[in-house]
Image (cartoon, coloured by chain):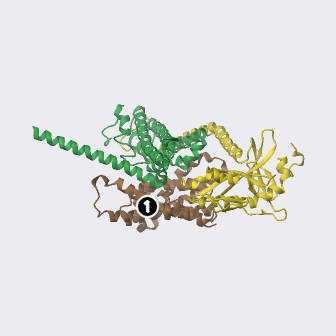
Amino acid sequence: MNRVQPTAPLPETPTFAMLRTLAGIAMLAGLLVVLVFQWTRPIIEENKRIAIEHAVSKVVPGAVTKRDFILGPDGLHAVDGGTAPPGERIYLAYDGSGRFIGVALEAAAAGYQDVIRILYGYDPVCQCVTGIKVLKMAETPGLGDKIAFDPAFLKNFAALDGTVDPQGGTLQNAIVTVKHGTKHQPWQIDAISGATISSNAIGRMINASAQRMFPLIIRYLDELKRGSVPADKPDGGGR
Amino acid sequence: MAPDSLTFIFLNAALINNFVLALFLGLCPFLGVSAKKETAWNMGLATMFVMLVSSVSAYGINWLLTLLKIEFLRLICYIAVIASAVQLVEMVLKRFSPILFRALGIFLPLITTNCAILGLALFQTNREYDFLQSIAFCIGAGVGFTLALMLMASLREKLALAKVPTVAQGAALSLMLAGLLSLAFMGFAGLGGSHA
Amino acid sequence: MTGQLIRQEQVTPDTFLRGLWEENPVFVMMLGLCPVLAVTNSTINALAMGLATTFVLVSSGALISLLRNLIPKQVRIATYIVIIATFVTIVDYLIQAISLDLYNALGAFIQLIVVNCVILGRAEAYASKQKLPAAVVNALGMGAGFTLALLCLGTVRELLGAGSILGFHLFSANFEPWVVMVLPPGGFFVLGSWLLLFEYLKQRRARKAEAAAEVMAHGS
C-alpha cells in the first residue's frame, strides 16, 4: 500500500495527524449514518403507520383509517412536532366511508415481569370498550402472555361497559378484574385463571385510563366528530 | 405500584429484571471476575460508579441531541461519552484517591466494553425516564449487578473445594450455576404488580 | 495469529473455516455472550441477530483494513469504536425498515452489538493487520461461526420451549412446552449443555488419540 506516513516501529505521530484521522473518520461516519437515515426514514415511518393502523383496526372493529390527536382537559389539539399541549394522544378511527366510529387509546401498568402497554378501543355511542391489543409485554410464556391472545379473555373486551356518570367526571362503575368465573356485570373483567397479576394489570390500566379519558371524550364528542381543532382557527371546522 | 414510580424502577432493575440474570448484560465480568468475593465486590463498586457517571452524561447527551434533532447520532455519542467517562473516572481516582484507585484501577478499562453500561444508557433512553427515574434505574442496575456478582462468587468459592467431573470444569459449570441463580431470581417477578 | 512475525496472510479456506469451528467466537472464545443468551429465545431472532452481527463484522473489518495505514496507533481504539458504532447505527435503521416486529423483538440488543467483544477483538487482532480480502473472508467466517452458535441455541430453545421451529409447530397438541427454556434461565442451561457436549467430545477424542499413540508405540 502507499506510504502516507513513515511506518517505523511506534513512530511519533504528530498530534495533527491524529486529529486529522479522527476528524476524517468522524465525518465519514456522520455522512454514512445521515445517508442511511435519510434513505430509510420514509420506509420506517410507513412501517410504523401501518403497524398502528393495524392495531387500531383490531381494537375498533371496522376501522380503516385513523387520525392522531391529543385530548386534554381543555379539548382537542392537533399533533405537530412543536410544543406538546397538555393531554394524551388518541387515535380517531374512521370506517371505509369516512364515518367516525370510535377512539383508540393507549394504557400501561406494571405487569408480572415488566410494564405492559396496550391499545384499546372506545365506542362513544354505546359508551363501551370495543377491544384491546397488547403492544408490549414481557409476561411469562404460557401463563401471563395469554392476555394477548386467549379468546375467552379477549371476549371480555368486546363490549366492556364504560358509561360515564353524567354528573361527575368519572365512570358510573369502575372497571375491575374479578376472579375467574365470577363475572356478573358488564363492567367486570373475567381474569385468566393462573394469570391473576397480568389480568389485574389489564383491568387496572384500563380503569385508570378510562376514568381520565372517557369523560373527556364524552364532553368533547362534538369536536371529535368534527375531527378538527377549533379555537385556534375559527374557520377551520367542518369536513 | 405505578410503573413509573421510583421504587418500582429500582426494584425492577435490581431484582425482577436483574441486569445479569434476566437481561444478560455484563456477562463477561460476571463469568470472568466472580471467582473471589473480594474482587467481585470491588468490580461491583467500580461498575456502579461508572454507571452513575455515564447515566447522568447519557441523560445530558440525549437532551442535547433531541434539542438539535440529531437523534440518529445517539449511539455513536453514547459510546464515545462512556469511553471518555471511564477515562475521566480513572484519572480523577488516581489523583484524589490512590487507595480506591489501587482497588478498582485494573477493572476500569474492562468496564468500557461492559455492555451493562451502554445497555443502561440505551434502556433509560428507550423508556423515556426523566432525570430522577434515570438515577433510580441506574442505582438499581448497579445494586443488581453487584448482588449477582457476589452471589456467584460465594457459590464458586464453595465449589472450589467440591469434586467436579472433568468435563464440567470451567465455563460450563459457571453457566449452569448462573442458570440456577437466574431461576431463583424469577421468584422476584410480581413484586411490582401484585399490589394495586 | 502469533506475534508480529506473520505480517500478511494468504486467503485460504482456513481463513474462513477457522471462525466457524476452531476459533468459534462463542463456543471456543466465549466472546459476545450477551446477545447469544438474550435474543435466542426463538430461531428467527437468533438468525436476525447473527446476520446483523455478521454485517457489522464484515463492513467494519473491510473499512478498518482499508484504512489500516492511515490510523495512528495511539487513537486506533477510538477510531475502531466510532467505525463500529456507525455500522451498528446503519444496521439498526435497516432492520427497522425491513420489519418493525423483528426490531421490537430484538429491542436494544441491536444497538448493543457495538460492545460485542467479537467485533472489536477482530478489528484489533486481525483486520488492522491484514489486507482487504483476508480481512473480509475472516470476518465472514467469524460471522458465520457466531450465527451458527446463535442458531444452535435458538433452535434448541424454541423447540423445547415452544414446540416449534421458525414458528412451525412440530409436535402434537398434547406436547407440554418447557416454558423455562424460552425464559432467561433456559439460555444459561442450553449454552452450558452445549459446552458440556463439546468438552465431552474433545476429551473423548483426546483419549482415543492417546490410545492410538500407545498402540503405535507398542507396535513399533
Q: Which residue is drawn at 87% across and 48% down?
A: A233
Residue that label 1 marks: B181
Q: Quadrant for the C terminus of chain A, please.
A: top right
Q: Which of C48 and C113 is in front in this view?
A: C48
Residue neighbourhood size for the residue with mark 1, other residues' Cα within 10 Å, grouped as few (<14), some (14–19), many (≥20):
some
Chain B display color: brown
Which chain is painted in green? C
Q: Residue at x 61, y 51 (%)?
A: A150
Which chain is painted in yellow? A
Q: Is residue B11 left or right of residue B182?
A: right
Looking at the image, can residue A9 be seen? yes
Q: In which quarter of the image is residue C98?
A: top right
Q: In this view, does B33 lie to the left or right of A45?
A: left
Looking at the image, can residue A13 be seen? no
Outermost right residue: A235
- Label 1 secondary element: helix
- How far from the left and from the top, in percent, is residue B79? 52, 51
Q: Quadrant of residue C205?
A: top left
Q: Is residue C173 left or right of residue A151?
A: left
